[in-house]
Image (tube, helix red, strand yellow):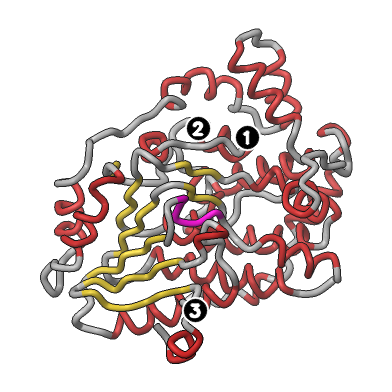
Amino acid sequence: MSEAAAVTGVEPELIARREGAAGIIRLNRPKAINAVTLEMMHDIDKALDAFEADPAVAVIVLEGAGERGLCAGGDIRTLWESSTAKGDLGKILWRDEYILNARIKKFPKPYVAFMDGIVMGGGVGLSAHASHRVVTDKTKLAMPEVSLGFFPDVGGTWLLSRSPGEIGTYFGLTGGTMNGPDAIHAGFADAVVPAAKLPELREALTKVRAGATAADIKALIDGFATGETAGPVASKQAMIDKWFAHDRMQDIVAALQADGSEFAQATLKTLGEKSPRGLVVTLKLLRLARTASSLEECLVREYRAALEVFASDDFREGIRAAVVDKDRNPKWSPPRIEDVTPEMLARYLAEIGADELKFP
Protein backbone atom coordinates (compact mmCIF):
# COMPACT_ATOMS: atom_id res chain seq x y z
CA MET A 1 0.00 0.00 0.00
CA SER A 2 1.27 3.44 -0.90
CA GLU A 3 1.96 6.12 1.69
CA ALA A 4 -1.07 8.10 0.50
CA ALA A 5 -3.27 5.04 0.74
CA ALA A 6 -2.04 4.36 4.26
CA VAL A 7 -3.06 7.88 5.28
CA THR A 8 -6.52 7.78 3.67
CA GLY A 9 -7.23 4.14 4.42
CA VAL A 10 -8.23 3.64 0.77
CA GLU A 11 -6.42 0.97 -1.22
CA PRO A 12 -4.94 1.99 -4.57
CA GLU A 13 -6.59 0.82 -7.79
CA LEU A 14 -3.46 -1.12 -8.72
CA ILE A 15 -1.63 -3.15 -6.07
CA ALA A 16 1.88 -4.36 -6.93
CA ARG A 17 4.06 -6.15 -4.40
CA ARG A 18 6.41 -9.08 -4.06
CA GLU A 19 5.16 -12.15 -2.24
CA GLY A 20 7.98 -14.63 -1.95
CA ALA A 21 9.24 -15.33 -5.45
CA ALA A 22 6.18 -13.82 -7.14
CA GLY A 23 5.64 -10.26 -8.28
CA ILE A 24 1.91 -9.84 -7.72
CA ILE A 25 -0.07 -7.37 -9.85
CA ARG A 26 -3.64 -7.02 -8.63
CA LEU A 27 -6.25 -4.99 -10.46
CA ASN A 28 -8.17 -3.43 -7.58
CA ARG A 29 -11.44 -1.89 -8.73
CA PRO A 30 -13.80 -4.74 -7.81
CA LYS A 31 -16.97 -2.61 -8.03
CA ALA A 32 -16.10 -1.89 -11.68
CA ILE A 33 -14.99 -5.50 -12.29
CA ASN A 34 -11.47 -4.08 -12.30
CA ALA A 35 -11.91 -1.99 -15.46
CA VAL A 36 -8.50 -0.50 -16.20
CA THR A 37 -7.75 3.21 -16.33
CA LEU A 38 -4.81 4.97 -17.97
CA GLU A 39 -3.24 5.47 -14.53
CA MET A 40 -3.52 1.75 -13.76
CA MET A 41 -1.76 0.90 -17.01
CA HIS A 42 1.05 3.25 -16.12
CA ASP A 43 1.30 1.61 -12.69
CA ILE A 44 1.44 -1.86 -14.26
CA ASP A 45 4.30 -0.68 -16.46
CA LYS A 46 6.17 0.65 -13.40
CA ALA A 47 5.56 -2.63 -11.55
CA LEU A 48 6.97 -4.61 -14.46
CA ASP A 49 10.06 -2.35 -14.41
CA ALA A 50 10.60 -3.14 -10.72
CA PHE A 51 9.90 -6.88 -11.01
CA GLU A 52 12.10 -7.28 -14.08
CA ALA A 53 15.02 -5.69 -12.22
CA ASP A 54 14.49 -7.61 -8.95
CA PRO A 55 16.42 -10.93 -8.92
CA ALA A 56 14.16 -12.17 -6.10
CA VAL A 57 11.16 -12.10 -8.44
CA ALA A 58 10.98 -15.32 -10.47
CA VAL A 59 7.42 -15.04 -11.81
CA ILE A 60 4.71 -12.41 -12.33
CA VAL A 61 1.12 -13.15 -11.28
CA LEU A 62 -1.74 -11.00 -12.63
CA GLU A 63 -5.01 -11.25 -10.69
CA GLY A 64 -8.22 -9.31 -10.15
CA ALA A 65 -9.75 -8.24 -6.84
CA GLY A 66 -13.25 -9.40 -5.92
CA GLU A 67 -15.34 -12.34 -7.04
CA ARG A 68 -16.64 -11.17 -10.41
CA GLY A 69 -13.65 -11.33 -12.70
CA LEU A 70 -10.14 -10.38 -13.67
CA CYS A 71 -11.12 -7.33 -15.73
CA ALA A 72 -14.22 -6.15 -17.61
CA GLY A 73 -12.13 -4.02 -19.99
CA GLY A 74 -11.15 -0.38 -20.22
CA ASP A 75 -12.79 2.60 -18.61
CA ILE A 76 -15.02 3.29 -21.61
CA ARG A 77 -17.21 5.92 -19.96
CA THR A 78 -14.17 8.17 -19.57
CA LEU A 79 -13.28 7.54 -23.21
CA TRP A 80 -16.84 8.46 -24.20
CA GLU A 81 -16.62 11.72 -22.25
CA SER A 82 -13.34 12.62 -23.95
CA SER A 83 -14.64 11.69 -27.42
CA THR A 84 -17.81 13.69 -26.86
CA ALA A 85 -15.73 16.72 -25.83
CA LYS A 86 -13.38 16.15 -28.80
CA GLY A 87 -10.52 15.44 -26.39
CA ASP A 88 -7.46 13.27 -26.99
CA LEU A 89 -7.72 10.56 -24.30
CA GLY A 90 -8.17 7.81 -26.89
CA LYS A 91 -4.95 8.74 -28.65
CA ILE A 92 -3.02 8.66 -25.36
CA LEU A 93 -4.71 5.71 -23.67
CA TRP A 94 -4.60 3.33 -26.63
CA ARG A 95 -0.98 4.26 -27.39
CA ASP A 96 0.17 3.44 -23.87
CA GLU A 97 -2.09 0.39 -23.60
CA TYR A 98 -0.89 -1.18 -26.85
CA ILE A 99 2.75 -0.61 -25.93
CA LEU A 100 2.04 -2.38 -22.62
CA ASN A 101 0.34 -5.27 -24.44
CA ALA A 102 3.45 -5.78 -26.58
CA ARG A 103 5.68 -5.59 -23.50
CA ILE A 104 3.69 -8.30 -21.73
CA LYS A 105 4.12 -10.68 -24.68
CA LYS A 106 7.90 -10.20 -24.64
CA PHE A 107 8.38 -10.01 -20.86
CA PRO A 108 11.57 -11.91 -19.99
CA LYS A 109 10.23 -13.62 -16.86
CA PRO A 110 7.28 -16.03 -16.72
CA TYR A 111 4.04 -14.04 -16.55
CA VAL A 112 1.01 -15.94 -15.22
CA ALA A 113 -2.46 -14.46 -15.77
CA PHE A 114 -5.37 -15.71 -13.65
CA MET A 115 -8.23 -15.28 -16.13
CA ASP A 116 -10.97 -16.08 -13.65
CA GLY A 117 -14.53 -14.81 -14.06
CA ILE A 118 -15.15 -11.98 -16.53
CA VAL A 119 -12.24 -11.18 -18.87
CA MET A 120 -13.10 -8.71 -21.62
CA GLY A 121 -11.49 -6.13 -23.90
CA GLY A 122 -8.59 -4.45 -22.13
CA GLY A 123 -8.51 -7.34 -19.65
CA VAL A 124 -7.73 -9.66 -22.56
CA GLY A 125 -4.83 -7.38 -23.51
CA LEU A 126 -3.32 -7.70 -20.05
CA SER A 127 -3.73 -11.48 -19.87
CA ALA A 128 -3.98 -13.26 -23.22
CA HIS A 129 -0.47 -12.15 -24.29
CA ALA A 130 1.02 -13.66 -21.11
CA SER A 131 3.38 -16.61 -21.26
CA HIS A 132 1.07 -18.66 -19.00
CA ARG A 133 -2.69 -18.09 -19.26
CA VAL A 134 -4.88 -19.80 -16.67
CA VAL A 135 -8.66 -19.97 -17.10
CA THR A 136 -11.16 -21.54 -14.70
CA ASP A 137 -14.60 -23.10 -14.58
CA LYS A 138 -15.93 -19.55 -14.02
CA THR A 139 -14.19 -17.85 -16.94
CA LYS A 140 -16.31 -15.72 -19.28
CA LEU A 141 -13.97 -14.30 -21.90
CA ALA A 142 -15.11 -12.04 -24.71
CA MET A 143 -14.07 -9.35 -27.16
CA PRO A 144 -17.45 -7.53 -27.45
CA GLU A 145 -16.17 -4.30 -28.99
CA VAL A 146 -18.31 -4.48 -32.15
CA SER A 147 -21.29 -3.78 -29.87
CA LEU A 148 -19.68 -0.37 -29.23
CA GLY A 149 -18.99 0.56 -32.83
CA PHE A 150 -15.40 -0.56 -32.25
CA PHE A 151 -13.37 -3.68 -33.08
CA PRO A 152 -11.37 -6.25 -31.05
CA ASP A 153 -8.20 -4.33 -30.20
CA VAL A 154 -5.36 -4.74 -27.63
CA GLY A 155 -3.89 -7.29 -30.04
CA GLY A 156 -7.26 -9.00 -30.39
CA THR A 157 -6.91 -9.12 -34.18
CA TRP A 158 -3.59 -10.98 -33.76
CA LEU A 159 -5.11 -13.54 -31.38
CA LEU A 160 -8.40 -14.05 -33.21
CA SER A 161 -6.75 -14.41 -36.60
CA ARG A 162 -4.69 -17.28 -35.21
CA SER A 163 -7.63 -19.23 -33.80
CA PRO A 164 -8.35 -22.52 -35.63
CA GLY A 165 -10.47 -22.21 -38.76
CA GLU A 166 -13.00 -19.39 -38.49
CA ILE A 167 -13.47 -19.59 -34.72
CA GLY A 168 -11.73 -16.23 -34.29
CA THR A 169 -13.83 -14.61 -37.00
CA TYR A 170 -16.95 -15.88 -35.23
CA PHE A 171 -15.93 -14.59 -31.81
CA GLY A 172 -14.65 -11.28 -33.19
CA LEU A 173 -17.82 -10.48 -35.13
CA THR A 174 -20.41 -11.78 -32.65
CA GLY A 175 -18.62 -10.72 -29.45
CA GLY A 176 -19.60 -14.15 -28.15
CA THR A 177 -18.44 -15.42 -24.77
CA MET A 178 -15.88 -18.21 -24.42
CA ASN A 179 -15.78 -20.47 -21.40
CA GLY A 180 -12.40 -21.70 -20.19
CA PRO A 181 -11.98 -24.70 -22.51
CA ASP A 182 -13.16 -22.71 -25.55
CA ALA A 183 -10.65 -19.98 -24.68
CA ILE A 184 -7.95 -22.64 -24.93
CA HIS A 185 -9.34 -23.91 -28.23
CA ALA A 186 -9.37 -20.35 -29.59
CA GLY A 187 -5.76 -19.73 -28.53
CA PHE A 188 -6.53 -17.25 -25.74
CA ALA A 189 -5.49 -19.50 -22.83
CA ASP A 190 -3.33 -22.48 -21.95
CA ALA A 191 -4.79 -24.38 -19.00
CA VAL A 192 -8.06 -24.78 -17.10
CA VAL A 193 -7.59 -24.77 -13.33
CA PRO A 194 -10.70 -25.04 -11.12
CA ALA A 195 -11.36 -21.69 -9.43
CA ALA A 196 -11.31 -23.44 -6.06
CA LYS A 197 -7.68 -24.42 -6.69
CA LEU A 198 -6.42 -20.95 -7.64
CA PRO A 199 -5.37 -20.01 -4.06
CA GLU A 200 -3.28 -23.18 -3.84
CA LEU A 201 -1.69 -22.53 -7.24
CA ARG A 202 -1.03 -18.93 -6.26
CA GLU A 203 0.71 -20.07 -3.07
CA ALA A 204 2.83 -22.53 -5.05
CA LEU A 205 3.89 -19.76 -7.44
CA THR A 206 5.17 -17.65 -4.56
CA LYS A 207 7.50 -20.52 -3.65
CA VAL A 208 9.14 -21.29 -6.99
CA ARG A 209 12.90 -21.27 -7.13
CA ALA A 210 14.89 -18.29 -8.34
CA GLY A 211 15.44 -18.49 -12.05
CA ALA A 212 12.44 -20.75 -12.64
CA THR A 213 11.95 -21.28 -16.37
CA ALA A 214 8.79 -21.09 -18.43
CA ALA A 215 8.83 -24.89 -18.56
CA ASP A 216 9.04 -25.07 -14.75
CA ILE A 217 6.01 -22.79 -14.40
CA LYS A 218 4.06 -24.75 -17.02
CA ALA A 219 4.74 -28.00 -15.19
CA LEU A 220 3.58 -26.46 -11.92
CA ILE A 221 0.35 -25.16 -13.48
CA ASP A 222 -0.30 -28.46 -15.26
CA GLY A 223 -0.28 -30.15 -11.85
CA PHE A 224 -3.46 -28.22 -11.01
CA ALA A 225 -5.08 -28.31 -14.46
CA THR A 226 -8.06 -30.36 -15.63
CA GLY A 227 -6.67 -31.06 -19.10
CA GLU A 228 -9.74 -29.65 -20.90
CA THR A 229 -8.97 -28.05 -24.25
CA ALA A 230 -12.29 -27.50 -26.06
CA GLY A 231 -15.73 -26.29 -25.02
CA PRO A 232 -19.22 -26.00 -26.56
CA VAL A 233 -18.32 -23.64 -29.39
CA ALA A 234 -15.51 -25.91 -30.59
CA SER A 235 -18.14 -28.58 -31.25
CA LYS A 236 -19.77 -26.23 -33.78
CA GLN A 237 -16.54 -25.53 -35.65
CA ALA A 238 -17.61 -27.16 -38.93
CA MET A 239 -20.67 -24.90 -39.20
CA ILE A 240 -18.74 -21.81 -38.13
CA ASP A 241 -15.98 -22.50 -40.66
CA LYS A 242 -18.57 -22.76 -43.44
CA TRP A 243 -20.44 -19.56 -42.58
CA PHE A 244 -17.53 -17.30 -41.65
CA ALA A 245 -15.03 -18.23 -44.38
CA HIS A 246 -16.06 -15.24 -46.51
CA ASP A 247 -14.18 -11.95 -46.76
CA ARG A 248 -17.30 -9.77 -47.09
CA MET A 249 -19.90 -9.29 -44.35
CA GLN A 250 -22.70 -9.52 -46.92
CA ASP A 251 -21.55 -13.04 -47.85
CA ILE A 252 -21.36 -14.15 -44.21
CA VAL A 253 -24.89 -12.85 -43.62
CA ALA A 254 -26.13 -14.61 -46.77
CA ALA A 255 -24.58 -17.91 -45.66
CA LEU A 256 -26.32 -17.64 -42.30
CA GLN A 257 -29.63 -16.69 -43.92
CA ALA A 258 -29.44 -19.76 -46.15
CA ASP A 259 -29.07 -22.05 -43.13
CA GLY A 260 -32.29 -22.75 -41.25
CA SER A 261 -30.63 -24.11 -38.11
CA GLU A 262 -31.37 -22.55 -34.75
CA PHE A 263 -27.67 -21.75 -34.23
CA ALA A 264 -27.42 -19.98 -37.60
CA GLN A 265 -30.50 -17.89 -36.93
CA ALA A 266 -29.34 -16.97 -33.42
CA THR A 267 -25.96 -15.93 -34.85
CA LEU A 268 -27.68 -13.86 -37.53
CA LYS A 269 -29.76 -12.09 -34.88
CA THR A 270 -26.61 -11.32 -32.87
CA LEU A 271 -24.85 -9.82 -35.90
CA GLY A 272 -27.94 -7.73 -36.61
CA GLU A 273 -27.50 -5.97 -33.26
CA LYS A 274 -23.90 -4.89 -33.95
CA SER A 275 -22.54 -1.77 -35.58
CA PRO A 276 -22.50 -2.41 -39.35
CA ARG A 277 -19.41 -0.24 -39.67
CA GLY A 278 -17.78 -2.06 -36.75
CA LEU A 279 -18.49 -5.44 -38.38
CA VAL A 280 -16.96 -4.44 -41.73
CA VAL A 281 -13.89 -2.89 -40.08
CA THR A 282 -13.42 -5.90 -37.80
CA LEU A 283 -13.61 -8.42 -40.64
CA LYS A 284 -11.08 -6.44 -42.69
CA LEU A 285 -8.66 -6.14 -39.75
CA LEU A 286 -8.97 -9.88 -39.01
CA ARG A 287 -8.17 -10.78 -42.60
CA LEU A 288 -5.19 -8.41 -42.72
CA ALA A 289 -3.94 -9.84 -39.40
CA ARG A 290 -3.67 -13.33 -40.88
CA THR A 291 -0.56 -12.31 -42.81
CA ALA A 292 0.96 -10.21 -40.00
CA SER A 293 4.42 -11.27 -38.85
CA SER A 294 4.11 -9.95 -35.29
CA LEU A 295 1.76 -8.74 -32.59
CA GLU A 296 3.28 -5.28 -33.00
CA GLU A 297 2.26 -5.15 -36.65
CA CYS A 298 -1.36 -5.80 -35.65
CA LEU A 299 -1.20 -3.26 -32.82
CA VAL A 300 -0.01 -0.56 -35.23
CA ARG A 301 -2.92 -1.30 -37.56
CA GLU A 302 -5.33 -1.36 -34.61
CA TYR A 303 -4.03 1.98 -33.39
CA ARG A 304 -4.62 3.64 -36.74
CA ALA A 305 -8.15 2.26 -36.83
CA ALA A 306 -8.80 3.20 -33.19
CA LEU A 307 -8.01 6.85 -33.89
CA GLU A 308 -10.75 6.86 -36.51
CA VAL A 309 -13.13 5.02 -34.16
CA PHE A 310 -12.56 7.61 -31.44
CA ALA A 311 -13.77 10.35 -33.75
CA SER A 312 -16.78 8.39 -34.98
CA ASP A 313 -20.44 8.76 -34.12
CA ASP A 314 -20.83 4.98 -33.83
CA PHE A 315 -18.35 4.77 -30.96
CA ARG A 316 -20.11 7.49 -28.98
CA GLU A 317 -23.53 6.02 -29.80
CA GLY A 318 -22.49 2.48 -28.83
CA ILE A 319 -21.21 3.55 -25.44
CA ARG A 320 -24.22 5.81 -24.91
CA ALA A 321 -26.62 2.93 -25.50
CA ALA A 322 -24.67 0.37 -23.47
CA VAL A 323 -23.18 2.34 -20.59
CA VAL A 324 -24.50 5.90 -20.34
CA ASP A 325 -28.25 5.76 -21.04
CA LYS A 326 -28.34 1.94 -20.98
CA ASP A 327 -31.30 1.79 -23.36
CA ARG A 328 -29.59 -0.96 -25.41
CA ASN A 329 -30.95 0.68 -28.55
CA PRO A 330 -28.09 2.20 -30.53
CA LYS A 331 -28.80 4.06 -33.77
CA TRP A 332 -25.92 2.99 -35.98
CA SER A 333 -24.57 5.09 -38.84
CA PRO A 334 -24.92 3.77 -41.44
CA PRO A 335 -27.70 1.43 -40.31
CA ARG A 336 -27.02 -1.39 -42.79
CA ILE A 337 -23.94 -3.41 -43.69
CA GLU A 338 -24.44 -2.76 -47.41
CA ASP A 339 -24.29 0.98 -46.74
CA VAL A 340 -20.73 0.82 -45.41
CA THR A 341 -18.76 2.15 -48.36
CA PRO A 342 -15.15 1.42 -49.35
CA GLU A 343 -14.41 5.08 -48.64
CA MET A 344 -15.65 4.69 -45.05
CA LEU A 345 -13.51 1.58 -44.56
CA ALA A 346 -10.44 3.26 -46.04
CA ARG A 347 -10.39 5.86 -43.25
CA TYR A 348 -9.79 3.10 -40.68
CA LEU A 349 -6.83 1.80 -42.65
CA ALA A 350 -5.11 5.12 -43.32
CA GLU A 351 -1.43 5.08 -42.41
CA ILE A 352 -1.51 7.82 -39.80
CA GLY A 353 -0.58 8.04 -36.15
CA ALA A 354 1.48 4.86 -35.96
CA ASP A 355 4.71 6.77 -35.40
CA GLU A 356 3.47 7.38 -31.84
CA LEU A 357 3.72 3.65 -31.03
CA LYS A 358 7.30 3.17 -29.86
CA PHE A 359 7.65 -0.47 -28.86
CA PRO A 360 10.48 -1.43 -26.48
In this orientation, does residue 154 appear?
Answer: no
Residue position marked by numbered label 1 in the rendering: 174
Horizontal arrangement in the rendering, residue 136 relative to residue 324 (left or right): left
Whether residues under marks 1 and 3 lie with C-beta atoms below 8 angstroms apart, the answer is no
Query: Residue at position x 19%, y 68% from top?
Result: 206
Q: CA distance from mark 1 to mark 2?
A: 11 Å
Kind of residue sitting beneath label 3: Val
**Disc 1 versus disc 2: nearer the observer:** 1
Kind of residue sitting beneath label 2: Ile
Return the x and y of residue 96 as percentages of the image width and height.
58, 74
In the depicted structure, whether residue 136 falls above or below residue 13 = above
Residue position marked by numbered label 3 in the rendering: 10
Q: Nearer the viewer, residue 190 or 342?
A: 190
Return the x and y of residue 338 as percentages of the image width and height.
85, 32
Query: Residue at position x 74%, y 37% from top?
Result: 274
Q: Secondary structure at mark 1?
A: helix
* Numbered tag placed on residue 167 in the rendering: 2
Q: Secondary structure at mark 3?
A: loop
* Mark 3 / mark 2, whichever is N-terminal: 3
Q: Is residue 237 magenta?
A: no
